[in-house]
Amino acid sequence: METETLAEKPTPPAPSTLDLYTVYVQTITAAEQRRNQVALAYLAVISIVAGLIGIYDETDALWFVGPIGALALLWFLNMLYFRSLAKAKFEVIKDLEKDWEYKPFAQEWEYLHSMPGYKRVSLSMVETTVPLLICLAAASYVAWRLWC
């Protein structure tokens, strides 16, 4: 049995732009789902820790609020990462569409922005504001407890 060298192996055909586009849109969908799962996980853990304050009322709340603030900060940083990742992925989509006669992604954004009453408060803005507010509230409580 003969062994093939790298030079002898046939080169697979290059994927079409449509194939790349299809795969890339699937990666965007997967990243959005992962972002939602991460946000839900942080919110669940923070809610559980906050609930423990009521269960263990003899324990100083500072022991719970500190970890809540740290978790909220991590949540905030994760959401910033996912926002940057999404922006980069959408730029790649635009690049893939640039030579097409019909550009579905660009058309969707054009329709969205032309809708009457459209106001731009993106989901990622809400997803970064909520953990930031939780983190600031926790930090304020810790500061108040340590200095008052």
Image (spheres, rainbow, N blue to C red):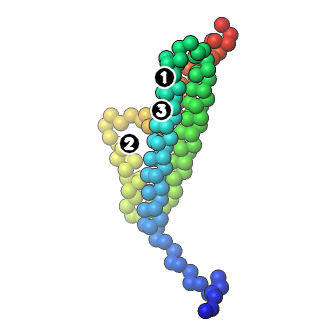
Foreground label between 2 and 1: 1
- The answer to whether the residue labelled 3 contacts the one labelled 2, judged by CB atoms less than 8 Å apart, is no
What residue is shown at x 54% (from left), y 39% (from top)?
79
Mark before the other along the chain sequence, 1 or 3: 3
Task: Give the alpha-carbon distance from disc 3 to disc 2, as whole Å.
Answer: 34 Å
Which residue position holds label 1? 51
Mark 3 surroundings within 10 Å by alpha-carbon count, few (fewer than 14), some (14 through 19), many (20 or more): few
Residue at the bottom extreme, as displayed: 1
Residue at the top extreme, as displayed: 148
Question: What label does residue 44 carry, if any?
Answer: 3
Question: What label does residue 142 carry, if any?
Answer: none
User: Callout 3: helix, strand or loop?
Assistant: helix
Residue 6 picture quarter: bottom right
Residue sitting nearer the eye, 62 or 137: 62
User: Callout 1: helix, strand or loop?
Assistant: helix
What amino acid type should be assigned to the residue bearing mark 1?
Answer: Gly
Q: Is residue 98 visible in this depiction of the protein?
A: no
Task: Give the alpha-carbon distance from disc 1 to disc 3, as whole Å.
Answer: 10 Å
Q: Quadrant of the C terminus?
A: top right
Residue 10 picture quarter: bottom right
Q: Is residue 96 visible in this depiction of the protein?
A: yes
Position of 55 compared to 67: left or right? left
Residue sitting nearer the eye, 41 or 141: 41
Which residue position holds label 2? 113
What residue is shown at x 56% (from left), y 30% (from top)?
72
Foreground label between 1 and 3: 1
Q: Position of residue 126 (x, y in %)?
A: 46, 32
Q: Position of residue 64 (x, y in %)?
A: 58, 22
The image shows residue 52, relative to residue 32, as above or below, that is above
Position of 8 compared to 96: left or right? right
Mark before the other along the chain sequence, 2 or 1: 1
